[in-house]
Image (cartoon, rainbow, N blue to C red):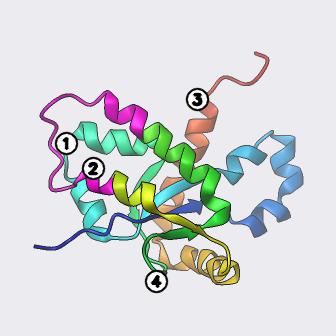
Amino acid sequence: MYAMKYDFYMFCATPEELQRKYSKLLSAFNMEETAAQKVALFRDPKVVEAIATASDEVRECFLRSGFELTSYDRGIRGGGFPVEDTEARSKVLAQLRENLEALPEGTDWNGFDVDAFLAVADAAQPVTRVRKKFAEARRAILPVLKLDAVHRISSRVVSRALSKPAPGI
């Protein structure tokens, strides 16, 4: 039996270079925070496949929590993540735990072991000394991911932001 790798990475749908280049435009539309939002990508395609073919409730639980059903493996050892992803990773995991509580009994997980996933996620440690390697990997991810996946991720991030009421309204 294939043992799934439950590690995941945080991915910013709008690369930092584009955020800097279009900072005035993003600011004019009050979209700086939206452009900087990150989503979680599993590194193992088998994990994505298991969630994608699990029950609708499981799939929606992960999507609402900030995960995307697209995989990418940077080739970095398991159990580590870039230190700059700590806050975004914590938010995604907190939202996932909240959403998991609402799932009905007898939910079809299709081989995905949520307890093993949470144990791996909780045990992961921030890594600081390979910042340059992570930055290079982040720049390289856009050509590797299918364009439709990048568009879907960006669209979902913008849709989430637009569905929230504006501050002070």
Callout 4: 10 Å neighbours few (<14), some, many (20+)?
few
Which of disc 2 and disc 4 is earlier in sequence? 4
Q: CA distance from mark 1 to mark 2?
A: 17 Å
For disc 1, the marked residue is 55
SS at mark 3 in the image: helix
Left or right, 98 with respect to 139, comes to left
Proximity of marks 4 and 1: CB atoms separated by less than 8 Å: no
Which amino acid does the dot numbered 4 rest on?
Gly
Asked whether residue 152 is in view, the answer is yes
In which quadrant will I find the C terminus?
top right
Q: CA distance from mark 1 to mark 3?
A: 25 Å
Q: Which mark is residue 115?
A: 2
| Near-viewer residue (141 or 79) | 79
Instruction: State whether residue 101 is above or below residue 137.
Output: above
Which of disc 1 and disc 4 is earlier in sequence? 1
Q: Which residue: 56% across, 37% down?
A: 160
Q: Quadrant of residue 77?
A: bottom left
Of badges 3 and 2, the one in the foreground is 2
Of badges 4 and 1, the one in the foreground is 4
Which of disc 3 and disc 4 is earlier in sequence? 4
| Near-viewer residue (119 or 8) | 119
SS at mark 1 in the image: loop
Which of disc 2 and disc 3 is earlier in sequence? 2
Q: CA distance from mark 4 to mark 1?
A: 30 Å
Q: Picture coordinates of residue 85 (x, y %)?
A: 62, 59
SS at mark 2 in the image: helix
For disc 3, the marked residue is 163
